Amino acid sequence: MKHPSLVRNLMLTAVLVTSTCTFAQISFSIVVAPPAPLYEAAPYLPPGYVWAPGYWAWNYDHHIWVRGRTMLQRAGYRWQPDHWEQRDGAYSRQVGRWESERMDQPEHRKIAGNSQGNHNQSLKYKNKNKNARQGKNNSDH
């Protein structure tokens, strides 16, 4: 009768030891800079297509080169290619994305240009009305 409880206790001890060992893993990271980009000649692109250049991707323990590709152009957007950025001694890959072409033009210039023109027109209108009122008031006296 003591034999089954001894086996059960040994099994329970084995389970506890293995489960606590799995939580005691040591993790560390190695900072590895990506290699310099490889040169790829962009192929002839028909109208309506853009070239997305290749980039280095991280594959578990080393970098691999992902070749460039042709993509269908999106009207009003430009392709921002994949690239690596270094921050606080570590490298992170920024995934390629479409950016609005309007982002190239600073908004404050566009707004200032438009509002300045409207502002000048409204000042002319106010001055014209002011002069008309003053002339009318002068003629009343």
Image (spheres, helix red, strand yellow):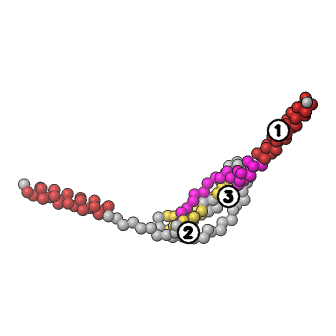
Write the residue at 72% across / 53% down.
105
Horizontal and vertical percent position of residue 116? 78, 47
- Look at the image and tell me whether residue 67 can be seen: no
Q: Is residue 139 left or right of residue 117?
A: right
Residue type at tag 1: Lys
Which residue is labeled 2 in the image?
34
How far apart, in angstroms, are the residues tagged by discs 3 and 1? 53 Å
Q: Which residues are magenta?
A: 91-114
Write the residue at 64% across / 57% down.
80
Horizontal and vertical percent position of residue 124? 85, 41
Q: Nearer the viewer, residue 33 or 133?
A: 133
Which residue is labeled 3 in the image?
51
User: Which element type, helix, strand or loop, lies under badge 1?
Assistant: helix
| Mark 3 or 1, nearer chain start | 3
The quadrant of the picture occupied by the C terminus is top right
Residue 55 in which image quadrant: bottom right
Disc 2 crowd rating (10 Å Cα; few below 14, some 14-19, many 20+) is some
